Amino acid sequence: MIDDALTPRIGKVATRELALHGITRYADLRLRSEAQLLAIHGVGPKAVQILGEELARRGQSFAATR
């Protein structure tokens, strides 16, 4: 079974800010779009790219932009 906890490669600030918004697992990311994540202070393009790559590795993706 693949660990569902977010990768530490995104950094402490991004991890903390995502947690403040209730995002602590990859399953939580599937409910958000890239734009929604980028709107969170402390979550930048590099973190979103890393998370997107990990989601793709799992055969998943971010939510579609509405």
Image: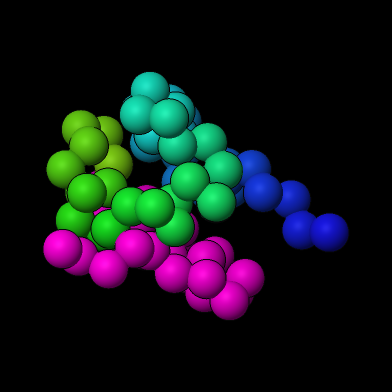
- For the N terminus, the quadrant is bottom right
The residue stretch that appears in magenta? 44-66
Give coordinates of residue 2: x percent, y percent: 76, 58
Residue at 44% x, 69% y is: 61
Q: Please identify the residue farthest to the right as the structure is shown.
A: 1
Picture coordinates of residue 47, whole percent (x, y): 37, 52
Q: Which quadrant is home to the C terminus?
A: bottom left
Q: Along the line of sight, which residue is nearer the eye, 2 or 46? A: 2
Compared to residue 21, the image places residue 66 above or below, namely below
The answer to which image quadrant residue 54 occupies is: bottom right
Q: How many marks?
A: 0
As for residue 7 lying within the magenta part, the answer is no
Residue at x 74% of width, y 50% of height:
3
The reply, left or right, for residue 60 in relation to residue 3 is left
Against 52, residue 57 (above or below) is below
Q: Position of residue 19 (x, y in %)?
A: 44, 28
Tell me, yes or no, if residue 27 can be seen here.
yes
Q: Position of residue 20 (x, y in %)?
A: 38, 23
